[in-house]
Image (cartoon, grey):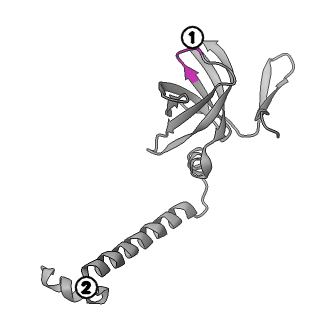
């Protein structure tokens, strides 16, 4: 798909109305909150109606324009968040606001991983992100200990002898 193409297309389904074909399945969620930003400031919160790896259904309490770019931050129920850039692909009046389809243009690899993990929780593969994260934390602690011990002039091999007077049993 080239730039500016949609991630979904509508096809006629007999006399029953429109059906959507999507690259990524849409999952209805009402437990995700969204903070929306334009180019310079926060525009407020909006309600998420559904989400997929390719887009977000968002209800806005005010008028929005098709083609409008926005920045968003999704607060996931598990405490994580996903930030990115999207473009409004369609907008329709709905009750006192507008229901929209926002195409996700950029959420980075970490945001993509978090969103995929949230939408597809049954994946039993090794969680390589957490393995790497733990390894990086351990490496940072070791480097920090070496740097502090060097700065204080302490040999790390002498650390057990230095800490033995603190042993209270």
The reply to whether callout 2 and callout 1 are in contact (CB within 8 Å) is no
The percent position of residue 134, horizontal first and vertical second, equals: 46, 66
From this viewpoint, is residue 127 visible? no
Return the residue at label 1.
Answer: 95
Task: Give left or right: position of 134 versus 53.
Answer: left
Which of the two residues, 74 or 119, is positioned nearer the viewer here?
74
Residue displayed at 30% across by 85% down: 156
Return the residue at label 2.
Answer: 159
Q: Nearer the viewer, mark 2 or mark 1?
A: 2
Determine crowd level at label 2: few under 14, some 14-19, many 20+ residues with C-alpha closer than 10 A: few
Q: Which residues are magenta?
A: 59-63
The percent position of residue 168, horizontal first and vertical second, equals: 12, 79
- 121 within the magenta span: no
Task: Give left or right: position of 56 versus 160.
Answer: right
Residue displayed at 43% across by 67% down: 137
65 in relation to 80, above or below: above
The percent position of residue 74, horizontal first and vertical second, equals: 51, 37
Nearer the N terminus, badge 2 or badge 1?
A: 1
């Amino acid at each position: 798909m080239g730039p500016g193409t949609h991630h979904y297309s509508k096809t006629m389904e007999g006399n029953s109305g429109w059906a959507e074909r999507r690259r990524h399945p849409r999952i209805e969620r009402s437990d995700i909150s969204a903070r929306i930003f334009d180019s310079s400031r926060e525009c407020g919160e909006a309600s998420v109606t559904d989400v997929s790896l390719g887009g977000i259904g968002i209800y806005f309490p005010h008028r929005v324009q098709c083609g409008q770019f926005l920045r968003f931050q999704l607060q996931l129920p598990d405490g994580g968040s996903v930030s990115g850039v999207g473009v409004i692909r369609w907008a329709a009046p709905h009750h006192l606001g507008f229901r929209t389809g926002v195409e996700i243009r950029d959420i980075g690899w970490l945001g993509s991983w978090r969103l995929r993990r949230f939408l597809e929780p049954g994946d039993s593969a090794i969680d390589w992100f957490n393995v790497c994260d733990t390894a990086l934390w351990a490496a940072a602690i070791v480097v920090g200990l070496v740097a502090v011990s060097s700065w204080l002039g302490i040999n790390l091999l002498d650390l057990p002898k230095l800490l033995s007077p603190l042993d209270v049993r």
